[in-house]
Image (tube, grey):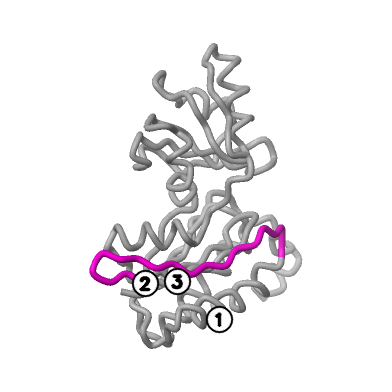
Amino acid sequence: MNILALDTSMGACSAALLQRDDGARNIFARAERMARGHAEALMPMVAEVMSESGTSFAELDVIAATTGPGSFTGVRIAISAGRALALVTRAKLFGIDSLTVMARQAHDAAGGAPFAIAADARRGMVYFGLYDEAARKLDGPRLIAPGDAAALLPNALKAAFGSGATLVAEAAGERGLAIEAGLPELEPSAIDLAALAADSGETVPVLRPLYLRPPDAKPQAQAAIARRR
């Protein structure tokens, strides 16, 4: 099975090709941290991992993409690319939220205990999720204030990971809970996304973006009135 995974949801861009055959796995990946430019970077990365792996697009079985939350534009880039490639290759689709992808990477740092993922969503908010000791999702993703996130933390949970983890840990401290904040540079990774797709074995008929807040750009009222005439 050949799985192409794409992520552009947050502060990095990555593509990975996972080959699975009789239990053996080979992974070919490219990744780069970036605040913008995901659309220009993604397809060259795809071309590189396809070439390095010796896989043709016709040989793809599954195309996976993170569905959000994340930046409004970034989420759409990987989903649009995944949809287009699936249309051409007839590969099946797999989608999962970006926090669960981050949780798979943070699993080892959690030391076999439940943990939280918190990504800074700006404007005093975080993208937040709770995970058990095996990185299985318990709650989320949510767009929530750090104080409200701290109120959801179970007593057994002692760690939060991601760019918003410090905000949640500070809010938890105000409630008398000692939470360790770690992995501030954590981003979703196409490598982890590909592994989740392979382990799941599930597919979806269509990739749909997960937007937890409305876009910043809104049509001007005057323009909306003009269109209705």
Amino acid type for the residue under numbered disc 1: Ala
Q: CA distance from mark 1 to mark 2?
A: 16 Å
Q: Would you say residue 77 sits in the magenta stretch? A: no
- From the top left corner, tell me how far across and down residue 173 is, in percent: 58, 16
Q: CA distance from mark 1 to mark 3?
A: 10 Å
The image quadrant where one finds the C terminus is: bottom right
Please state which of residues 188 and 208 is positioned toward the viewer in this rendering.
188
Q: Which residue is mark 3?
A: 17
Q: Are marks 2 and 3 in contact (CB under 8 Å)?
A: yes
Q: CA distance from mark 2 to mark 3?
A: 7 Å
- From the top left corner, tell me how far across and down residue 12 is, in percent: 63, 58
- From the top left corner, tell me how far across and down residue 65 is, in percent: 46, 65
The image quadrant where one finds the N terminus is: bottom left
Disc 3 secondary structure class: strand
Q: Which residue is mark 1?
A: 47
- Could you classify mark 3 by the number of other residues whose Cα lies within 10 Å: few (under 14), some (14-19), or many (20 or more)? many
- From the top left corner, tell me how far across and down residue 64 is, in percent: 42, 67
| Residue sitting at the far left | 22
Disc 2 secondary structure class: strand
Q: Is residue 187 above or below residue 3?
A: above
Q: Which residues are magenta?
A: 20-36
Q: Which residue is mark 2?
A: 19
Q: Is residue 219 above or below residue 55?
A: above
Amino acid type for the residue under numbered disc 2: Gln
Mark with earlier residue (1, 2)? 2
Please state which of residues 70 and 160 is positioned toward the viewer in this rendering.
160
